[in-house]
Amino acid sequence: MAHRLSSMVAALLATSVLTVPVAAAAQDKILRIGMTAADIPRTLGQPDQGFEGNRFTGMTIYDSLTAWDLSKEDEASVIIPSLATEWEVDPEDNTKWVFRLRDDVTFHDGSPFNAEAVVWNVQKVLDESAPHFDASQVGVTASRMPTLRSARAIDEFTVELTTSEPDSFLPFNLTNLFMASPVHWQAKFDETGEAEAAWAAFAADPSGTGPFRVTAFAPRERLELAPNTEYWNPDRTPKLDGVVLVPLPEANARTAALLSGQVDWIEAPSPDAIPQIEARGFTIYSNPQPHVWPWQLSFAEGSPWLDKRVRHAANLCFDREELQILLGGYMGIPKGTVTPDHPWWGNPSFDIRYDPEEGQRLMTEAGYSADNPVRIKVQTSASGSGQMQPIPMNEYLQQALRECYFDIELDVIEWNTVFTNWRRGAMDESANGAHAINVTYATMDPFFAMVRFTSTKTFPPVSNNWGHFGNDEFDALIEDARTSFDPDARDAALARLHARLVEEAPFVWVAHDTGPRAMSPRVTGVVQPRSWFIDIAPMDMN
Amino acid sequence: MLAYTIRRIILTLPVLLGVSVVCFALVHISPGDPLISILPADASVDLQERLRVLYGFDRSYAEQFLLWLSRAMQGDLGTSIATGRSVTTEVMRAVGNTLMLASVATVIGFVLGSLFGFVAGYFANSPVDKAASAAAVFGVSVPHYWLGMVLVIIFSAQLGWLPAAGAGPGGSGQWRLDLEHLSYMILPAITMSVIPMGIIARTVRALVSEILAQEFVIGLRARGLSEWGVFLHVVKNAAPTALAVMGIQLGYLLGGSILIETVFSWPGTGMLLNSAIFQRDLPLLQGTILVLALFFVVLNLIVDVMQSALDPRIKR
């Protein structure tokens, strides 16, 4: 009997192997994307899964008042109008902003987009008394627009936003608030009778104003999008027949899915698979992202980093080009938190480069030598979002910095624990005596790029100034940037802040990620901007 | 028989309570913030506290446990923090997918394992035994996720014959019994079957060798029973143990397929657990562990009852 059964199984396997045309799944112009996320990012308007969520279920299904310009690959991505055509701060009261809205936008359900819709979307995360307030959307949204407090409709297409303090960064923050349809939500509420259930129903059948609308949703497996042919922006009206998002968290599975023709695009192929992917005719797109892979230094009492010469030496004593080769070329070489072509660059007097002689001189001056190295403990993780390849990279630094009299001890702990410790600070016992922490961060928004690491108001546990770096000078620079409402003046103030940041070096700047992604040669119209995001809407397929 | 079954069911109740306590305690003593999936590291202290209250994490552990247990007993495992979806729905969908894959893998493992085991036991110390035993040792020794990757590289990436990932062209919700959908199951099922195949083969080989050496087999042959007849007697004597091993293996496959499901992006309990662990999604983690533990307990119960039906001595 066992023989008979096994023969049947073998015959079934053989038949399947011979008859199933796997790669034939691609039909029409359906772009199938293998994401690194383990689940479809939330579709109800405020995605989870970090910026990968915004990239795939935020900017595709929804729009925000302001947006990132993703149309250029050779310039820094800047803020542009989206659902708001223009905005200005009230000159009398700098906590009030007036945003004028487009008057030709409708949601996927056909209802109009207007000022009331903006108010409703602000309330969904900020007004606990609103019937549609949803706690699950608060965390990922409120923390990215920390000063926004309320919204008020002035007329049908003009809205007033109020912040807790004067804050010129608001237009950056608003890229994170996606506009969901109040009318569609109300219909779900009328069906379910309960806000939480209405949001769950809305997530399964969402309605935004974005270039794509949802046609099928299988949680944890796939999300199917169809073009929104009524989209308000002709430059972003999709040419594709559809997009399918597939969560493929395992790097080898993503590569195999691409090579076998199951998907047309994968995020973050593992570096060692890239030569094989290229050899099979696929295209690798990459560009330095607004991302920093740093060591964030401790300024706690007794820390060796209190000596600026030691901080500068660490930034001079390893060859970033060598590290770039180690990473297969997929790494940007940092000269600071932002790149020299960025509006916030500011021309710092300290040049981050490879200069071991100068590094050794500084270390000798600071009292260290080969026989008397400085002992440094660095807390890091073995993996994690944006961490690239933390172990080989940290081991490279450990080895390279030895030449400049650094004796580095790596304290490798689990990613979520490092992430939690990041908020607790260098003086907390969770730091375990570490003098530096290795947590990567995004630098698109001035608050997240610089302010939270340099203000005395952001010491732990308030925010991520893990090392307790800050003084009156930096607080004044931040205040100046936050209250400069003219975009050019604001950028100039941020440039002054950045220049001083690089000169004071509270970080060892190690790398910028380049966000490699592999695509089938069938995909055309791809622009990989200097951003965490990429615009799928203008893409096409042969 | 009925009394035995009822007694066994009653005995599982304290086990289930113990499982729920351990499951709750394990997920709560693990490091990390339970709100990490919806609360970025830069969230304000006020916001952290506000959400902690909204999600009930400000209450005492005892209060949280009793609340969770009372809901779980009514079939409501709560709401996933990360997705906002019902944990019961999520877990049951994943259990269905894993059960489908694990059942096929168990059948393959049981059939091949029994085949190899009987052949090896019947022809002990012969080249056939050595070949079958080598296959069994390979099964228990090879890291299954590695085998999965190798199979994917050969049959998906290189030959393009079989899909590399997923549960079907339209997802598991649209699964049908046809070749296109079965093709998604072939590689993960084969990968998953190697360990039960090896374990069952080794168990059955030892059993068959032992049974063949017993006096009743000599007696059967002395009475002139055909070799087929002797074989059937050996099978009947080996079946309870083989069945018990198979039941335990199915239990392991239901809960222990994290690596295989991750390699093949199979939307089952393994992927769900993986995702829940990395997102610190406590309700999802608790719900999945509890349901898997229940499955294990129920499977053992079924196997015990079946064993006692096959071998009445067990009831004593």
Image (cartoon, rainbow, N blue to C red):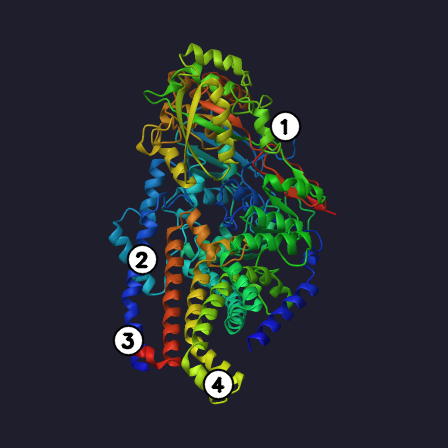
Residue type of the residue flagged with mark 4: Arg
Q: Quadrant of the N terminus of chain B?
A: bottom left
Along the polypeptide, which appears first: circle 4 or circle 2? 2
Element type where label 3 sits in the image: helix
How far is the residue under mark 3 from the one under mark 4? Answer: 40 Å
Chain under disc 4: B
Check disc 4 and report the residue beneath it. Answer: B221
Chain under disc 2: B
Along the polypeptide, which appears first: circle 2 or circle 3? 3
- Disc 4 vs disc 2: Cβ atoms closer than 8 Å? no
How far is the residue under mark 4 from the one under mark 1? Answer: 88 Å
State which mark lies toward you, 2 or 3. Answer: 3
Pointers 3 and 4 within a single chain: yes
Please say if B13 is above or below A272: below
Q: In percent of the image, x 40 and y 66: which residue is there?
A: B295
Q: Quadrant of the C terminus of chain B?
A: bottom left
Is residue A471 among the parts visible in the rendering? Answer: yes
Neighbourhood count class around disc 1 (C-alpha, 10 Å): few under 14, some 14–19, many 20 upward? some
Check disc 3 and report the residue beneath it. Answer: B7
How far is the residue under mark 2 from the one under mark 3? Answer: 28 Å
Residue type of the residue flagged with mark 2: Trp
Check disc 1 and report the residue beneath it. Answer: A75
State which mark lies toward you, 4 or 1. Answer: 4
State which mark lies toward you, 1 or 3. Answer: 3
Left-right relation of B203 to A516:
left
Check disc 2 and report the residue beneath it. Answer: B68
How far is the residue under mark 4 from the one under mark 2? Answer: 61 Å
